[in-house]
Image (cartoon, helix red, strand yellow):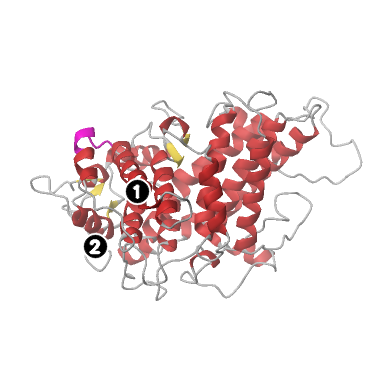
Amino acid sequence: MKRFVLCLLLALPTTACFRDSGINIDPNRSTTVDPSLLFAGAATQFSLLRVAELTWPVALSTQMWASGGRWGLAQAQYDQTRVRSAWGRTYTDVLKNLEVAQRLAEEAQPAQRNTVAQCKILKAFAYSQTSFLWGDIPFSEAATGEVDLPRFDTQQAVLDGCLRLLDEAIAAIDPAQGGRIGAPNDLYYGGDMVKWRRFANSLKLRILFSMVDQDQSKAAAIGQVISQGQMIAGNADAMQFRYFNQPGRQNPRFSFTAIFRGGVQSDWYASQVVFDLLTQLNDPRMTRFFQPGPGATGGQIVALRTTTEPFSAQSALVHMDLLRPDLPEISFSYSEQLLFEAEAYARGFAPGGFDLANQRYRAGVRESLLSFGVPAAQAETYVNGLPALTATNFRRELAQQQWLDLFMRPVEAWVQHRRSGAAGQEIPAMTVPPGAPVSGLVRRLLYRSEEVNSNPNTPSGLNLDSPMWFDR
């Protein structure tokens, strides 16, 4: 962990009173930085943001989880306080490190092409996630250290830019060559460039699906990605950051509960929206997502309503198994991949029709259930009972399963919900909690005040319920 802190410090921009003088140079300080250390630091910080800082506010404000007591229900659904620092940390601790690492790899003799590809893929992931959270963001002038007040590129331009980064990375990858970041500093794939290429293609698919309803040309691009293959093809290809049941290496959600709650989960409750959908579908993930409240009778799961009902000892909680110390942070799962493929076939973006759509759909739901610990026999029974996808029901059936699959990944779940239908027609249906500060559902995060006050290019006049380009 010490080297991660070191690499983060080395990556930050510095200033000096004597710009062209050697007076402030420490002769004992290294003047070179290993790109692999910068990459590891960026990956570590990015995962921490996803699994902790972004998880709780986004899960609560998008009604994936519920909260009671300490924050209050309406406030919890729209709480934005803790997520504001994620903006700055993404640019300084993640994207700046990746930018420096990429430049060093490009300047090496010979150039480290696989390292450059790894940096570009993770940059595309970080930029696309940031845009899905805030909308228009600095991209073309960001993280270079050369522009003090970067312009905000449109969301469409950012996402197209992420696709270009991925295409460049895919073209550069050569598994037969060296020049890569391997173990222990590649904390995702240990330097396996075949898996990095698979993730890059799958991430491309995710971004394309977020754009296709506003840019119809992306339908053909989706079909091309599907036809070329080389995407995530099994659980061994899943993009994940591992945590361990060891001090200092535990999942931050577990650490928070252990340190501040004495190991007793008392913050995150069963959302009525999730509960109602699981009940409607008779879904066996109910007891995997939630555990009975301390005062529940007979092990009953009782949701915490996102209206005015106060929480009680009967209110079910997010299951402690989903807050365990060694739970990995999943960035892209096999089940997500299969459900995207099902959608591509059902919508006619790739040839295969509903025969292939149903095959991928059932496989995706099966993988999702298994990933949450549902026994194989029970998962098979549930999948066999699913209605077949048809031209009249596939949007609803797929959207429901895609959203549930992302239960512990609220950023992706939020993107999925916003793209599932026009405003007011999203799947599943949600209502605005009484006392919320806006009349509509949360559709974006607000730029932090430091950015608004310091950069005149920051967009203005936006509210929490102002739609982004991709979900209009």
Quick check: 65 left or right of 448?
left
- Nearest the eye: 26 or 355: 355
Residue 194 image point, x, y percent = 57, 30
Q: Is residue 5 above or below residue 403?
A: above
**Quadrant location of residue 27?**
top right
Q: Residue at the location (63% across, 26% down)? A: 175
Q: Residues within 10 Å of mark 1 (few under 14, many from 20)?
A: some
Q: Which residue is mark 1?
A: 355
In space, the residues marked 1 and 2 are separated at their CA atoms by 39 Å
Q: Which mark is residue 373?
A: none
Q: Which amino acid type corresponds to the residue marked 1 in the rendered image?
A: Asp
Q: Residue at the location (27% across, 60% down)? A: 273
Query: In the image as oriented, which residue stretches furthest toward the left?
Result: 298
Residue 384 image point, x, y percent = 22, 44
Q: Which residue is mark 2?
A: 305
Quick check: 95 left or right of 207?
right
Bounds of the magenta segment: 373-378
Where disc 2 sits, the SS reads loop
